[in-house]
């Protein structure tokens, strides 16, 4: 079974649209994350979330919002998509050990 | 910003040991050294981590200098599937923490047949 899964794998959409990327982990971890990898392959943390707090990277526009329906899921909602949002988005999770397990990524293309 | 410095790229012959260096001269006493790798088009994968003692697992060995200002990741018998970008990351403690990982540019390791 896949530890951290994301859907969809590919997402192509028009500027101005609103879209969501789903993430699920079956590891029982209490913290989940979203990372963005841009065209230059830089990986950057966007959010980390557990049942107690949401930590937001200050550079992330407020058009991006994480939503956690339960401990195993952390979905990423993006409003008013822009060309610069095109990237690969990775979900990850961790427990007290500190090791993060990453999903396979979602390649978002904004036209 | 990443607190580590790594070479941009390295080559290694298949079957030989790959030694990937990392400088972290400003590491704090409570910070661990973590290594992850990212194979093309996949999510990053945890390899190993350590505080001050050398560590070994089924994937690799981690050698940390006595002053903790640098470390070396060793892949003992590199295979073509080890071609990837390797990231050296320092982070506080290994128990929890929701601050995520700060990735640098990493080292692109290319295993040559």
Image (tube, rainbow, N blue to C red):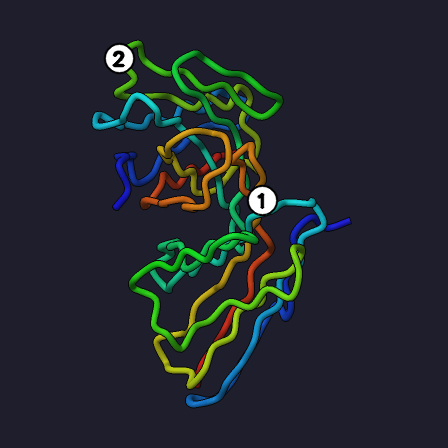
Discs 1 and 2 carry the same chain letter = no
Seen in the picture, residue A28 relative to A8 is either above or below; the reply is above
How many residues crowd mark 2 within 10 Å: few (<14), some (14–19), many (20+)? few
Residue nearest the viewer, comparing B85 with A29: A29
Residue B88 tag number = none
Q: Chain of mark 1?
A: A
Q: Position of residue B63 (x, y in %)?
A: 41, 15
From this view, report whether residue B6 is shown above or below residue A39: above
> Residue B47, image x and y in percent?
53, 31
Q: Quadrant of the C terminus of chain A?
A: bottom left
Residue B35 location (% of width, % of height): 45, 32
Which residue is rendered at x = 53% and y = 27% of the image?
B78
Q: Is residue A41 left or right of residue A107?
A: left
User: Which residue lies at the image location 38% right of the left edge and 21% below the top edge?
Assistant: B72
Q: Which mark is residue B67?
A: 2
Decide if residue A26 is on the left or right side of residue B76: right
| Chain letter of the residue carrying label 2 | B
Q: Quadrant of residue A16?
A: bottom left
Q: How far from the left and from the top, in percent, is residue B59?
A: 58, 26
Q: Which residue is mark 1?
A: A101
Q: Is residue A27 left or right of residue A76?
A: right
Label 1 – label 2 distance at C-alpha: 30 Å
Q: Closer to the camera, A10 or A59?
A: A59
Residue A5 visible at all: no
Which residue: 45% across, 19% down? B62
Secondary element at image label 2: loop
Indicate whether B40 appears above or below A10.
Answer: above
Determine crowd level at label 1: few under 14, some 14-19, many 20+ residues with C-alpha closer than 10 A.
Answer: many
Q: Secondary structure at mark 1?
A: strand
Outermost residue to the right: A1
Residue B48 visible within the image = yes
Q: Quadrant of residue B33?
A: top left
């Amino acid at each position: 079974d896949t530890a951290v899964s994301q859907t969809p794998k590919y997402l192509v959409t028009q500027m101005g649209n609103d879209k969501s990327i789903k993430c699920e982990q079956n590891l029982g971890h209490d913290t989940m994350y979203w990372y963005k990898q841009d065209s230059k392959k830089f990986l950057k943390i966007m959010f980390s979330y557990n049942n107690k707090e949401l930590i937001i990277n200050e550079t992330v526009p407020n058009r991006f919002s994480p939503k956690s329906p339960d401990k195993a899921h952390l979905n990423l909602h993006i409003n008013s998509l822009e060309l610069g949002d095109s990237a690969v988005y990775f979900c990850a999770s961790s427990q007290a050990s500190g090791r993060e397990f990453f999903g396979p990524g979602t390649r978002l293309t904004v036209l | 910003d990443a607190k580590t410095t790594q070479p941009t790229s390295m080559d290694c012959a298949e079957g030989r040991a790959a030694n990937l260096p990392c400088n972290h001269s400003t590491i704090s006493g409570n910070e661990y050294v973590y290594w992850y790798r990212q194979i093309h088009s996949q999510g990053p994968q945890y390899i190993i981590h350590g505080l001050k003692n050398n560590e070994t697992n089924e994937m690799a060995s981690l050698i940390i200098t006595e002053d903790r200002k640098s470390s070396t990741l060793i892949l003992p018998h590199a295979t073509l599937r080890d071609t990837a970008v390797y990231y050296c990351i320092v982070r506080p403690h290994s128990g929890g923490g929701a601050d995520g990982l700060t990735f640098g540019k990493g080292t692109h390791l290319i295993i040559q047949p």
